Amino acid sequence: MAAPVHGSLDAMDLLSADLVLRAATFALAMAGAAAIWARAPKSGNARLAAAVVGGMGAFALASAPGVYRALGIGVTLFEAWCIATPAFVWLLAMRLFRDEGPPSPWTFAVPVALVAVTMPAEYGRFRLGLLADHPQLSEGLLPAGRAAAVALVLAACWLAVAHWRADLVEQRRRVRAAFVALLGTAFVAMAASEFVFGSRGAPLAALVVAHTGLAALAFAAVVFAAAGDVAALLMEEPPRARRAPLSVVKPDGPEAALAQRVVDAMKTRELWKRERLGIGDLASELGAQEYRVRRAINRHLGYRNFNELLHEHRLEAAAARLADPREDRLPVLSIALDCGYGSIGPFNRAFKARYGVTPSQYRNARGGAAIAPISNSAR
């Protein structure tokens, strides 16, 4: 008779540990979210980071056993927050790791859509809510919602790693690695649990391990919020004034000479014409270490991404040729290929982002006589 009692006690111990970990995660996550928001209330990045951190606490609460009996309808707010969190992770990645400016306001419809699909399905399979009379539809929609959540987190991780090599901001390169290792792993594990364990849920032992990791992440968020300027740590920058094009903007310091070598090599040797030129290739051409070239371009030329530097050279050359009447018979595609672009699509998008018009419109307006480049502060 002792063995069954011992097993029962083990289960009770695991359940108690799980509930304690959930409570700790909820308290730490909400404290971290509030601290991040309070330290940078006007920062879009900080608001999204607070939503992501708070989402961990919402998950710990909304998925706890017996929570509906304890909180009733009030738990739906936390469940909606939990469901929307993968979309907040994706939106945060778009703001942190892209240099094309903040995402379109329409992208904020994604968390709303995710909640609108997943929450009714979550309740409907238990014959509750809007889909109470359609349990089979609920069973079909729920995996779709879970798959969308996983896809959003994986897309966020892709944004973090896609241009890691070209990123010239040292702090952001470290943030990319931490983002994928911590947030990506945690949220993929949470969102994918439905596929692994099904509607029966994960066993207690697995939950204890998972919630220990979540509690550690929530504690890290509190430490992060207390560490200093949240807006600076989340790389929220004020609009920058237009830089002097293709020149050294900060001429002091030991790497200024290397930055000038970058400028000279790009202009005289036209390295930017190479279609697949990367930061490693440029460092090899200069006979310098890659990290020093990266730092010189960022600190002394004012670029955050190596592709920005390439686009600056390529678009300046393309604009000059489009404005030249002697090249009117040359197709725009030929100019794009000559300037280092592999196809017309990326060239058209980059040109319009830089000048506000298509290459053909620029040519018809005779270039600089009618159209000026868009400043950094406007981009």
Image: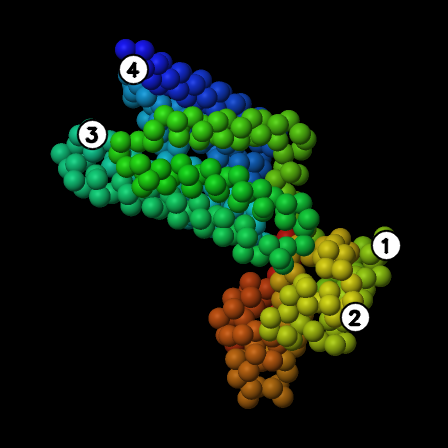
Q: Nearer the viewer, mark 2 or mark 4?
A: 4
Q: Disc 1 residue type?
A: Pro
Find disc 3 in the rendering and name its residue.
126
In the image shown, does 1 or 41 lie closer to the viewer?
A: 1
Between label 1 and label 4, give the one nearer the viewer: 4
The quadrant holding residue 78 is: top left
Element type at mark 3: loop
Query: Do the numbered discs 1 and 2 sit on residues whose CB atoms are within 8 Å?
Result: no
Residue at left 74%, top 77%? Answer: 269
Q: Is residue 278 visible?
A: yes
Is 56 positioned to the left or the right of 231 in the image?
Answer: left
**On the image, numbered disc 1 is attached to which residue?**
254
Q: Position of residue 93 (x, y in %)?
A: 52, 46
Kind of element beneath mark 4: helix
| Residue 44 image position (x, y, % from top left) | 54, 39
* Residue 22: quarter of image: top left
Dot 2: within a 10 Å radius of its alpha carbon, few (fewer than 14), some, or many (20 or more) residues? some
Whether the residues at callouts 1 and 4 have beta carbons within 8 Å, the answer is no
* Residue on which the image places disc 4: 4
